[in-house]
Amino acid sequence: MKMNKRGLLIVISGFSGAGKGTLMKSLTEEYDNYALSISATTRAPRPGETDGKEYFFKTKEEFEAMIANNDLIEYAQYVDNYYGTPKEYVLANLNEGKDVLLEIEIQGALLVKKQFPETVLIFITPPDANELKSRLINRNTEDMDTINKRLNRASEEALGVENYDYIIVNDDIDTCVDEFHELIIAKHDNNIEACNKYCVSNNINIINEIRESLCDFKKGE
């Protein structure tokens, strides 16, 4: 583990259903250099979720008080709910040398990058749009109206992927975890060649194919 060295601030974004939560859970279980930032949100807990573990669940009034008190690194609204990143936990872990993982949507990710230019932006995607739709349906947590909203949102999000530094395809979660960790080690070692494998500019064909499929979904509704 790194000693006396500031950690990396890593923002993970991706379509709803891309497997971001599973990825981060696996990373923190397998490696001791990662600290998972817990976001605050006004959305209702899903079955099995606990306040202070998956999220800090807040009322709209509580969240807006956090905004007023400048207690958040960033915040945004997504599908009718607030999401934000509490500041104190993130900065403390970076100073301890931990690589801090933030799960944030595109709007918030760009705000973090603006405040902290050294932030590493990583976009996680399933291999194709059909797989994305299947994952959303198979979660069995939302009705089709909400799933279609998420697919429509994904179509919009796909337009912002070029703003990210890296993209990783989550086809198999174990492979995704290995590739993610490989990338972060390469960043610490300043191994440009290893990083280039995951650069968005070198993998734009993947996102273009998903964009086209998401547009087809939209036309078919």
Image: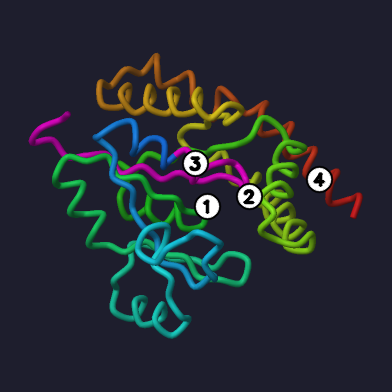
Q: Secondary structure at mark 1?
A: helix
Residue under label 4:
215
Instruction: Indicate whether residue 6 is drawn in magenta.
Output: yes
Q: Looking at the image, is mark 2 or mark 3 earlier in the sequence?
A: 3
Q: CA distance from mark 4 to mark 2?
A: 12 Å
Residue under label 1:
106
- Range of residues picked out in magenta: 1-23
Q: CA distance from mark 4 to mark 1?
A: 19 Å
Residue 88's spot in the image, x, y percent?
Answer: 22, 62
Residue 190's spot in the image, x, y percent?
Answer: 28, 21
Say if mark 1 contacts mark 2, CB within 8 Å.
yes
Q: Nearer the viewer, mark 3 or mark 4?
A: 3
The C terminus - image quarter: bottom right
Q: Looking at the image, is mark 4 or mark 1 earlier in the sequence?
A: 1
Mark number, residue 22: 3
Looking at the image, residue 34 lies above or below residue 54: above
* Residue displayed at 41% across by 42% down: 25
Q: Looking at the image, is mark 4 or mark 2 earlier in the sequence?
A: 2
Q: Residues within 10 Å of mark 4 (few under 14, many from 20)?
A: some
Q: CA distance from mark 3 to mark 4?
A: 27 Å
- In the image, what residue type sits under mark 1? Ile
Along the viewing direction, whichever of 183 and 134 lies nearer the viewer: 134
Say if mark 1 contacts mark 3, CB within 8 Å.
no
Q: Is residue 173 left or right of residue 51?
A: right
Q: Secondary structure at mark 3?
A: helix
Mark number, residue 157: 2
Q: Secondary structure at mark 2?
A: helix
- In the image, what residue type sits under mark 4? Cys
